[in-house]
Amino acid sequence: MLQHVMVPLDGSGLAEKALPYARQIIEDGGKITLLSAIDVPEYAVSAFYTAGVISENTNHQLMVDQMVPQTYGYLDGISRTLQNAGFQVECTAIIGEAATSIIEKAEETKVDAIVMCTHGRSGFSRWLFGSVTSKVLGGTTCPVFVVPNRDKEDQSNV
């Protein structure tokens, strides 16, 4: 059994599907680090897309100041459930690109493994968005347990 695992979460139900697997491979009372990477664009999204979500006047620091507490609120909710099950939990929100943040935090905290779900993108969407899972697999030295997206068929119309 492992003593310390990291579970990267992006706020989606899909990413949270990694949590039961993490609970299965960690010893009783072990430590789970929940990590969310907040990738805040430095430039207004509307500068690149006509239907941008963020106006050109949105301040980068203001976005960070709003997103960090929201992210910790999300992680704290999940943390309570894990703590009630007897695990030690650390919640971390990092401003930065997801794969890089996961790799750096895993090395810094010396986790025994990373447990993460893959979104299962392929083709153009994988090229456009990249694969966080692939980058983590290629960039870390610790084991990575990848939980496949079993709901791919349900997302084909998205």
Image (cartoon, helix red, strand yellow):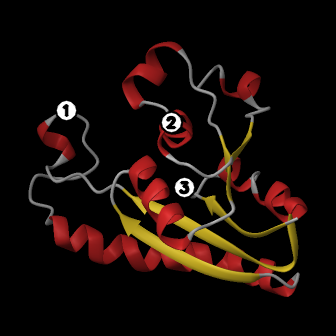
Q: Earlier in the sequence, mark 1 or mark 2?
A: 1
Residue 120: quadrant of the picture: top right
Please, which residue is most extreme toward the front here? 141
What separation in Å lies between label 2 and label 3 (alpha carbons)?
A: 20 Å
Residue 3, relative to residue 53: is it above or below?
A: below
- Position of residue 46 in the picture relative to residue 154 (left or right): left
Q: Residue at x 35, y 51 (%)?
A: 97
Residue picked out by circle 3: 10
Residue nearer the viewer, 120 or 46: 120
Q: Position of residue 57 (x, y in %)?
A: 9, 59
Residue picked out by circle 2: 138
Q: Nearer the viewer, mark 3 or mark 1?
A: 3
Q: Residues within 10 Å of mark 1 (few under 14, many from 20)?
A: few
Which type of secondary structure does the marked residue at label 2 adopt? helix
Question: How many dots with numbers?
Answer: 3
Q: Position of residue 47 (x, y in %)?
A: 11, 40
Q: Nearer the viewer, mark 2 or mark 3?
A: 2
Q: Position of residue 119 (x, y in %)?
A: 62, 35
Residue 122, relative to residue 111: is it above or below?
A: above
Q: Earlier in the sequence, mark 3 or mark 1?
A: 3
Q: Amino acid at mark 1?
A: Thr
Please report contact status of discs 3 and 1: CB closer than 8 Å, yes or no.
no
Please, which residue is most extreme toward the top here? 123
Q: Residue at x 65, y 20 (%)?
A: 156
